[in-house]
Image (cartoon, rainbow, N blue to C red):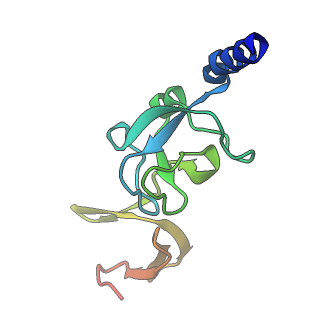
Amino acid sequence: MILRFNLLFLVFLLSPLTAVDVLIAINKIDYNAPILKKNLRFLSIENIKKRCVPLTIKALDNEKYISKHFINKNSVICKSSVKIYKKNSVIFNFGNIQIEQNGKIIFQNDEYITIKKNNGKVKKIYKNGQNK
């Protein structure tokens, strides 16, 4: 009886030692939405999935991250669920006017420039300033 009690007490004491500190989403996080500290909370969990490497606060302080997919409320933020934010923008000079648009240049010639936006749409901007 005493041995069972001692063993149970030992298991109870060691269980917090195996806990992993993770970041959990307070609200849902949309696709390509920035990962902000105000939308996360810190929690200790005993079991996480083997393929999930949790994102740390230190990594969140050093880099800006965006989500790779929709993240549900109260789910663990894994490194595979986020990617480092890179600003993709194109600046056009039309004389005195400068226009900055998000995306990257696909094709350019003397008449127009073709841009692929972050949402996947392709936009053609003519050098004389008209959009098509």
The one nearer the camera, 57 or 32, is: 57
Residue 40: x, y in percent?
Answer: 40, 40
Q: In the rendered view, would you say 122 is above or below 66?
A: below
Which residue shows up at 40% across the image and 36% down it? 41
| Horizontal side, residue 86 vs residue 5: left or right | left
The one nearer the camera, 95 or 65, is: 65
Total tally of numbered discs in the picture: 0
Q: In the rendered view, would you say 49 is above or below 105?
A: above
The one nearer the camera, 15 or 21, is: 15
Residue lying at the far bottom of the rendered structure: 132
Which residue shows up at 52% across the image and 78% down it? 109
Residue lying at the far front of the rendered structure: 1
Residue lying at the far right of the rendered structure: 3
Quadrant of the image containing the N terminus? top right
Residue 131: x, y in percent?
Answer: 32, 84
Which residue shows up at 55% across the image and 58% down it? 68
Which residue shows up at 39% across the image and 57% down it? 28
Q: In the rendered view, would you say 129 is above or below 2?
A: below
Q: In the rendered view, would you say 59 is above or below 49?
A: above
| Horizontal side, residue 49 vs residue 78: left or right | right
Quadrant of the image containing the C terminus? bottom left
Residue lying at the far left of the rendered structure: 96
Residue 71: x, y in percent?
Answer: 48, 58
